[in-house]
Amino acid sequence: MNLHYRFIQPLDVLFLRGNKLFGDPGSYGEALIPPWPSVAAGALRSRMLVDKNIDLKAFGAGKVTDDAELGTPEQPGSFMLTGFYLARKRADSQLELLMPAPADLVVSKTAEDKLLIDRLSPEPLALASSFPLPMLPVLAQGNQRSKPEGGYWLTQAGWSAYLNGQTPLPEQLEKSSQLWSLDARVGIGMSSATRSVEEGKLFSTQAVAMKDGVGFIAVVTGAVPPESGLLRLGGDGRAANIQQVNFNLPEADYTAIVRAKRCRIVLTSPGLFADGWKLPGCDSDDRVRLPGGIQARLVCAAIPRAETISGWDLARWQPKAAQKAVPTGSVYWLDELDATESSLRKLAENGLWGEPCEDVSRRTEGFNRFALAAW
């Protein structure tokens, strides 16, 4: 698979909105970080339409049918976003990946203000509970008391260690306040008929101001995205610079995973699964069958509260259908894994989609992406 890496660096504050309504008098719009991958997919494809001199209204109406990369709004072309991650440019100009702490990592702080990192591990406990899988994710702690902490991200070194079954070190964490800050902005309601201010309609929303050098890495296959210039990114189309970069994502040791016959699946983008929280291809006995002949048994999962994915359809000028999604960072433990290294790599390249794909538009936008990690 031919992958194209682009570093997207905001030149202004960003409005990275989630699925909560705002705009009514007194409402408050919260920023969503990490943003949905559709934010990047939409910005890149819009820029590509302009670069190709394609009439945007004609494309939205489905009258442009001869572009193999972008396809049509009804049937996307070969363009596919396979990754969208937070990143920063270090002092040596090298890019460093930044990942939200997965659901099986617990970050806490002691009374002496010392950071601790613990891992949840699957255990077969003889306890009466509503947990639907044979093992429960258990946190084994010592006698040292600590208080849970949030807002930490893994550095690239910490993410690489995590993928290979190690517990990241405290120095491999970065506080979100070192990566961006939030700036409350006040908005004024306007009449759609007269385009004048409507009295009493004030609302507020969060703007995201990235720290120096902090941006995003977008990974594209099936098309050549812009190599330089500007993008309109996020709500209100704020300016961002795009740059071609040489980069390789950290990955687990696939050979070791095949040999061990077990692994973890860690979502790197929200998962849109037909059976709610369960992985695609999972039957009533928790046996998982994935494309490429991969088979395994789902024994445990650590999943935060579901979120709702929607968005704005520019082609049709209407909201996209709202869908329940499994959050980024959710972790699934698979045992009795029957797979080859090549089949696992192909699955990682294609994402957790069936054959044929259940939703080609959402696949194009970068949903259902994951990383394999050792268990």
Image (cartoon, rainbow, N blue to C red):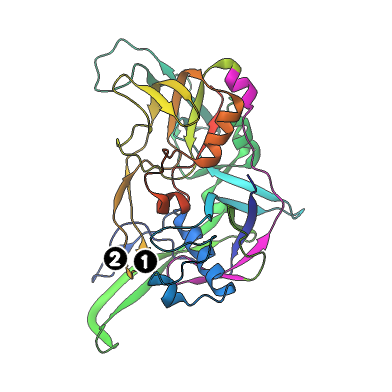
Q: Are marks 2 and 1 in contact (CB under 8 Å)?
A: yes
* Mark 1 lies on residue: 205
Task: Looking at the picture, tell me which residue is in the foreground, 37 or 73.
Answer: 73
Nearest the camera: 116 or 160?
160
Q: Residue 115 occupies which quadrant of the picture?
A: top right
With respect to residue 207, does 281 lie above or below?
Answer: above
Q: Is residue 154 magenta?
A: no
Q: Is residue 222 shown left or right of residue 135?
A: right
Q: Position of residue 186 (x, y in %)?
A: 36, 73
Seen from the viewer's position, the closer of residues 134 and 186 is 134
Give the secondary structure at mark 2: loop
Residue 252 in magenta stretch: yes
- The residue at which mark 2 appears reads as 22
Amino acid type at circle 1 is Thr
* Quarter of the picture holding the N terminus: top right
Q: Is residue 161 above or below residue 201?
A: above
Vertical relation: 169 (above or below) 244: above
Q: Is residue 22 left or right of residue 185?
A: left
Residue 323: horizontal and vertical position, in percent? 30, 49
Q: In what element is the residue under mark 1?
A: strand
The disc labelled 2 sits on which kind of residue? Answer: Phe
Give me the residue at 53% from left, 17% from top.
Answer: 261
Residue toward you, 34 or 180: 34
- Label 1 Cα crowd, 10 Å radius (few <14 / some 14-19 / many 20+): many
Q: Which residues are magenta?
A: 230-258
Whole-percent x and y of residue 78?
53, 54
Can residue 139 be seen from the camera position used here?
no
Residue visible at 52% across and 35% down in the picture: 347
Give the quadrant of residue 179.
bottom right
Q: Nearer the viewer, mark 2 or mark 1?
A: 2
Q: Is residue 293 above or below residue 175?
A: above
Q: As drawn, is 347 to the left or to the right of 323?
A: right
